[in-house]
Image (spheres, rainbow, N blue to C red):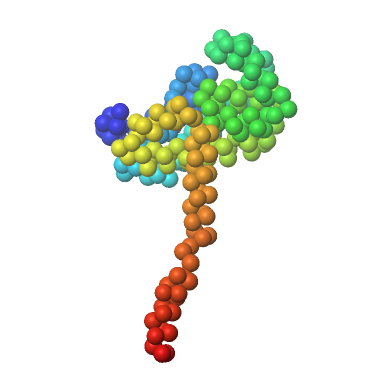
Amino acid sequence: MTDFLAGVPAPLALVAAVVLLFAESGLLVGVFLPGSGTVLALGWLAGQGVVEVWVAAVSAFGATALGCQHGFLRGRSLGPVQRHLVRRVGEERLARLESAMDGRAAVAVSTSQCFAVVRTLVPRLAGHSGMSHLRFTACNAPAAAAWATTLVLLGAWSGAAYEQVQTVVGVAGMPLLAVAALVAFAVWRLRRRCPARPGANRTADVPESHADRV
């Protein structure tokens, strides 16, 4: 996989990633597309110097956020959308998603960015549920930015372990990775707040200074 990615020109990689991520979050065909894997691959290319890290993160965020906006507006304008969704995802799964939207639309929109399939469906259901456009954007945009940035950085830092990181993301999902990132950040902060005490060096000098006085 990395051998194939290494041969992709930067402009082509960015265009392909933007198109795929928009489709993954904004079109119903997106339930079959690899959103997280695409962002990881874009991050790996950034780590190899093919594209800038910030360009990869902004492109991934912009594409998935615009796709979610498209899905939300489609859910609003199409009226009843169940018939279209049932054909693609099944009646039982759709019923669970609609139940999650009842009274918890903001939480559902924010957390759906971390999960494949629901990342595609929830914006449409949010639009269909009557959620305001401003509230949807306020919940979706920060989650999309965090999702895209985290995966781009993971891809950029993975190096030779790219295949393993991709497997972990596919199996464990973003929530587990987010918890691991928070734990690592907390440990880093604690180490910065608790530096080594300088008193040990001063105590070591006491016997020598005492001997000089004697």
Residue lying at 52% horizontally and 38% vertically, measured from the top left: 178
Q: Is residue 76 visible?
A: no
Q: Position of residue 203 (x, y in %)?
A: 45, 74
Q: Quadrant of residue 75?
A: top right
**For residue 197, above or below residue 113:** below
- Quarter of the image with the C terminus is bottom left
Residue lying at 37% horizontally and 41% vertically, measured from the top left: 156
Q: Which of 190 and 143 lies nearest the eye of the viewer?
A: 190
Image position of 185 (left or right of 161): right
Residue lying at 68% horizontally and 35% vertically, measured from the top left: 135
Image position of 96 (left or right of 58): right
Q: Position of residue 209 (x, y in %)?
A: 41, 84
Q: Residue furthest right?
A: 103
**For residue 203, above or below residue 39:** below
Image position of 139 (left or right of 8): right
Q: Which of 178 and 84 lies nearest the eye of the viewer?
A: 178
Q: Is residue 173 visible?
A: yes
Q: Position of residue 176 (x, y in %)?
A: 51, 34
Q: Quadrant of residue 162?
A: top left
Q: Position of residue 191 (x, y in %)?
A: 49, 56
Image position of 52 (left or right of 32): left
Q: How many marks?
A: 0
Q: Residue furthest bottom?
A: 214
Q: Which of 172 and 208 lies nearest the eye of the viewer?
A: 208
Residue lying at 52% horizontally and 55% vertically, measured from the top left: 190
Q: Which of 85 and 14 lies nearest the eye of the viewer?
A: 85
- Quarter of the image with the N terminus is top left
